[in-house]
Image (cartoon, rainbow, N blue to C red):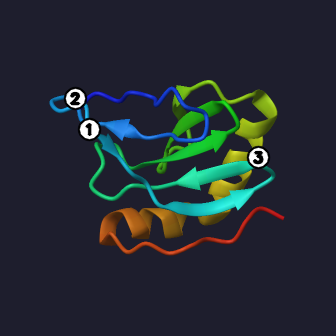
Amino acid sequence: MQLYFAGDAGRYGCKKQNTGQEIGMPEIARFYGIVIKLFFGDHPPPHFHAVYGEYVGLFNIDTLEMIEGDLPKRAKKLVIEWAEINKDEMKRMWDNQEFHRLPPLE
């Protein structure tokens, strides 16, 4: 499945390559204007999405590397700081496909 970024800054999602159908993603956290989303059953590797205004980023849960996206340096740093704290729980959510909210970065 190929990843496409939604053009609308208010929405961010993956689209199935074969259908072009957008996949909705539940919000798992929000802090400093950054929204973190996770979709179960999405394409590998296990990853989460970060949306900051018109900017987006897709992060590998295991390595916390930004796989794709254009997040500003400061927002990327905050996302990685938050993800370091919540990495194990995000991995459990991905593996078990059990959604719940995670605490924001404080």
Rendered image: mark on residue 21: 1
**Up/down of 28 relative to 19, above or below:** below
**Residue identified by numbered label 3:** 78
Mark 1 surroundings within 10 Å by alpha-carbon count, few (fewer than 14), some (14 through 19), many (20 or more): few
> CB atoms at circles 2 and 3 under 8 Å apart?
no
Q: Position of residue 4 (x, y in %)?
A: 38, 27
SS for dot 2: loop
Residue 77 appears left or right of 14: right
State the residue in front, 79 or 12: 12
Q: Position of residue 32 (x, y in %)?
A: 81, 52
**Residue identified by numbered label 2:** 17
Task: Give the quarter of the figure containing the N terminus.
Answer: top left
> Disc 1 or disc 2, which is closer to the eye?
1
Q: Which residue: 46% across, 55% down?
A: 38
Mark 2 surroundings within 10 Å by alpha-carbon count, few (fewer than 14), some (14 through 19), many (20 or more): few
Residue extending farthest left: 18
